[in-house]
Image: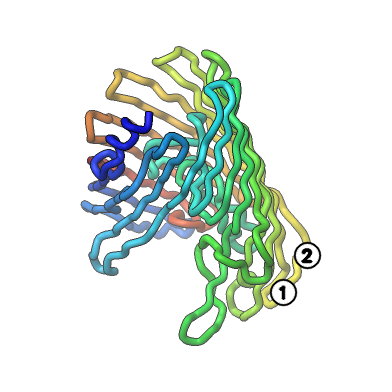
Amino acid sequence: DEANDEKGQNATNHMAVGVNVSYDYATSSATDGTKTTSANGISVPEVELWPLVGGFFGNWGLWDEVVLTPATNTGGEVGLEMADIRYAFGANDLFYNFRGGMLAAEGFGASDQWLDDGNIPLVDIMTPNYNQDTLVTPWGAMGKPQLGVEAGVNFDRTYITLGLYNGFTGVTTNPNTGAFESSDATAATAKHNDTGMRDFRVQVDKFIGSLGEITAGYYRGTTPLMSVDNSTQVTWLNHFDQSRLYVTAFIIPGTLDLLAGAGIMNNQHVPVAGSAVSDGSFSSQGQFVGLAYYVSPHLTLTARMDSFKFNANDKATGYSLQAELPYLNNLFVLHYNHVTSDVATGDFIAGKNDSASLSFRFLL
């Protein structure tokens, strides 16, 4: 009721803080035999602040996240990671919800949602590549947030969501010279070479009794990119679409889950540097399968196999092992990842990549 709502609306109930400390070790071996150790030490990846989260006045909900990175060799940063407002109404068996703001992809418990952001499947962190990186990964638990609005209807343990977004851009403007520069995928306020809000998503989440849960979705959008090797000031607009299917099957309910997922991605490409018009398209795909074993209420073990095809000729394969121990306000995570890739992308080189991390996270 309203009286209880007013009692609960205070800073203690609607604010949270998280601190991450980890020991990271990462090595790589390039195709020419060169071996590199890129991490071997203690780090504080980030401090997270959720200044205003939760439900208000019965129908309203807020979620915002501010991330602080440490002032080490490169200097610290403070950034708004996510911020959205939600409104929901209806009854238990049929209700509607709307949200808008800086949105990250949501799921309802299928294998698109992972507890550790160092253990995301390749299909959700690698990007299609024909003769240049297409940059965008709009799916998965740790997908980059973007500006947009969503509407959803929820009934019979089924959740349908439709979204419209500004999408992402791979082109920034140098504030001093006005020249175009290549960048990682950045949430777009307005897209270069594009007009208005064009990206859209449809997603269906379905709980199937005691069998498990399925998440299926389709995303279509555009991304401005620099032309091939960034040697010119020419930009072009990549029209792309991505489909996903994630499954969590309860093999032994409460003890053993099967985790699986697959994705198909279609992108355009330009032939050479200086080209601003696509001369064709190409397809990419990825899949994974794994198991989650709940040893006890406070210990989960997971193992997963991954594969990803950047294009018809280049691919990446990998596997991951992880142990999670949540207890009270603490979370301990140990993971090991191995990836062999034909293409350098993100944190991965072309060659063999191995990484291990022991993380401690405290939430208040």
Check disc 2: other Cα within 10 Å, few if <14, some if 14-19, many if 20+: few
Comparing 198 with 153, the one in front is 153
Q: Check disc 1 and give the amino acid type.
A: Ser
| Depth check, front residue: 65 or 91 | 91
At label 2, the amino acid type is Asp
Residue 364: x percent and y percent? 23, 40
How far from the left and from the top, in percent, is residue 300? 34, 25
Residue 31 is tagged as none
Q: What residue sits right under mark 1 in the picture?
A: 275
Residue 279: which numbered mark, if any?
A: 2
Task: Locate residue 115: give its quadrant.
Answer: top left
Residue at 61%, 38% in the rendered image: 161
**Measured along the vertical axis of the image, is residue 252 above or below residue 67?**
above
Q: Residue 187: percent from the left, percent from the top?
A: 52, 60
Mark 1 secondary-structure assignment: loop
In what element is the residue under mark 2?
loop
Query: Could you tell me if the residues under marks 2 and 1 are in contact, i.e. CB atoms within 8 Å?
Result: yes
361, above or below 79, in the image: above
Res 240 quadrant in image: bottom right
Asked if residue 339 lies left or right of residue 53, the reply is: right
- Quadrant (top left/top right/bottom left/bottom right) for the N terminus: top left
Q: Residue at x 41, y 38 (%)?
A: 57
The reply, left or right, for residue 128 in relation to residue 11 is right
Distance between the Cα atoms at labels 2 and 1? 9 Å
Question: Residue at 39% of width from left, 15% of height from top?
Answer: 255
Q: Give the residue drawn at x 55%, y 45%.
A: 139
| Image position, residue 61 (x, y; %) | 43, 41
Q: In this view, does 213 lie above or below 195?
A: above
Which sits in the foreground, 3 or 222?
A: 3
Hey, which residue is sitting farthest front in the picture? 3
Q: Residues within 10 Å of mark 1 (few under 14, many from 20)?
A: some
